[in-house]
Image (tube, rainbow, N blue to C red):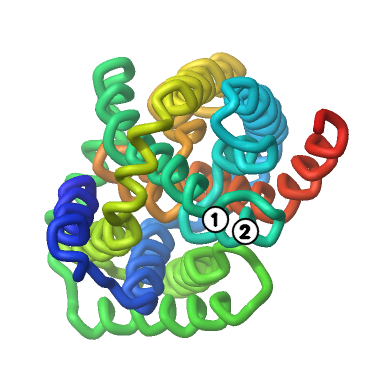
């Protein structure tokens, strides 16, 4: 995914002709949802209720760090308060700049800072997590065994069809991240209703990573790179803030028994829900609870955070 982001970004900067249509993102989200859902068992579903506790720890911590980091960036004098706050929102790179524009922030600065957050989330933090916590232990072995089994093309096609129908319904729904959320939910229902029939081979996950990375990289051009050159101090603040979130809150989730060590750090990593679902599998973690928490985080961030940040602007401006 990181390679796809870099390659697509370089193509755009050098030729100004980097482009990925929005259906590419939709397809990547559907495949990610199908991959997640196909690995869920009835036992996993019974554990879903346990996601409330980690959500009550993670989401308020994200909000506090968002506000504190935004205020610190605002104090540097490089941007207005609303722009500074929106730069630190742990949401989707495609959603947050549009919301920022509606709220009067500078979308070009927001998309640049959101790109940095995304690169941290999909490129840097997973490597650090691997160094600190290792891979997912026994779960990693389970994922590897699953990837070696034979797949039947008719079941793969059927799994994708279920995910695609549900994902497209989610896309037209008012729910943020509806495409992946509905695709995941539909695949989970299919996997539980027909055990052994929900199948998604590993190479399709790689295809989803390539599509997602190419789409993100195509959003970054020479203008965003030039803007980045003047944002040194805000970038340091942003990186520090999300290091604290990832390793501080992630460790808290682990110590309170909400997740294992690797799972806790991944849960607190500030990347997109679909991105983290794909990356967590690479680290040997195939957790339904983790995926549900990531989707819940994104939905809450998009629906609730903007109103709170608007109040903060009125309070401090």
**Element assignment for label 1:** helix
**Element assignment for label 2:** helix
- Residue 38 placed where, x, y %? 37, 64
- Residue 215 placed where, x, y %? 31, 63
* Placement of the C terminus among the 4 image quadrants: top right
User: Splitting the image into 4 quarters, where does residue 169 fall?
Assistant: bottom right
Q: Name the disc covering residue 71, or none.
A: none
Is residue 260 placed above or below 79 in the rendered structure?
above
Is residue 262 placed above or below 176 in the rendered structure?
above
Do callouts 1 and 2 mark residues in contact (Cβ within 8 Å)? yes
Query: Which residue does the numbered mark 1 point to in the structure image?
Result: 97
* Residue located at (22% from left, 37% from top): 141
The CA span between labels 1 and 2 is 6 Å
- Binning the other alpha carbons within 10 Å of mark 2 as few (below 14), some (14 to 19) or many (20 upward) gives some
* Residue located at (80% from left, 35% from top): 312
Q: Nearer the viewer, mark 1 or mark 2?
A: 2
Query: Which residue does the numbered mark 2 point to in the structure image?
Result: 101
Question: Does 54 sit left or right of 211 as displayed?
Answer: right
Is residue 120 placed above or below 29 in the rendered structure?
above
* Residue located at (53% from left, 46% from top): 294
- Residue 56 placed where, x, y %? 72, 33
Question: Does 128 sit left or right of 268 as displayed?
Answer: left
* Residue located at (26% from left, 22% from top): 134
Mark yes or no: residue 246 visible: no
Mark yes or no: residue 97 visible: yes
- Binning the other alpha carbons within 10 Å of mark 1 as few (below 14), some (14 to 19) or many (20 upward) gives many
């Amino acid at each position: 995914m990181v390679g796809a982001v870099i390659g697509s970004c370089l193509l755009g900067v050098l030729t100004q002709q980097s482009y990925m249509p929005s259906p590419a993102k939709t397809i990547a989200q559907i495949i990610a949802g199908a991959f997640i859902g196909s690995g869920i068992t009835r036992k996993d579903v019974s554990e879903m209720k346990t996601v409330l506790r980690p959500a009550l720890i993670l989401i308020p911590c994200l909000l506090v760090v968002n506000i504190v980091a935004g205020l610190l960036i605002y104090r540097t004098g490089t941007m207005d308060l609303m722009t500074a706050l929106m730069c630190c929102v742990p949401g989707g790179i495609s959603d947050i700049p549009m919301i920022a524009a509606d709220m009067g922030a500078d979308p070009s600065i927001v998309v640049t800072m959101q790109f940095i957050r995304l690169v941290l989330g999909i490129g840097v933090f997973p490597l650090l997590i691997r160094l600190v916590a290792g891979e997912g232990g026994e779960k990693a072995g389970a994922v590897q065994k699953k990837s070696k089994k034979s797949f039947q093309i008719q079941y793969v096609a059927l799994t994708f069809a279920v995910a695609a129908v549900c994902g497209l319904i989610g896309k037209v729904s008012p729910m943020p991240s509806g495409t992946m959320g509905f695709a995941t939910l539909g695949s989970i229902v299919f996997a539980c209703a027909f055990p052994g029939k929900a199948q998604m081979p590993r190479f399709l996950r790689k295809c989803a990573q390539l599509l997602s990375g190419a789409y993100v990289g195509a959003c970054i051009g020479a203008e965003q790179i030039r803007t980045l050159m003047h944002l040194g101090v805000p970038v340091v603040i942003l990186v520090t803030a999300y290091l604290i979130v990832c390793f501080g809150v992630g460790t808290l989730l682990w110590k309170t028994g909400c997740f294992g060590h690797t799972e806790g750090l991944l849960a607190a990593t500030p990347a997109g829900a679909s991105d983290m679902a794909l990356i967590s599998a690479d680290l040997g973690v195939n957790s339904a609870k983790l995926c549900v928490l990531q989707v819940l985080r994104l939905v809450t961030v998009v629906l609730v955070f903007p109103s709170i940040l608007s109040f903060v602007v009125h309070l401090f401006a």
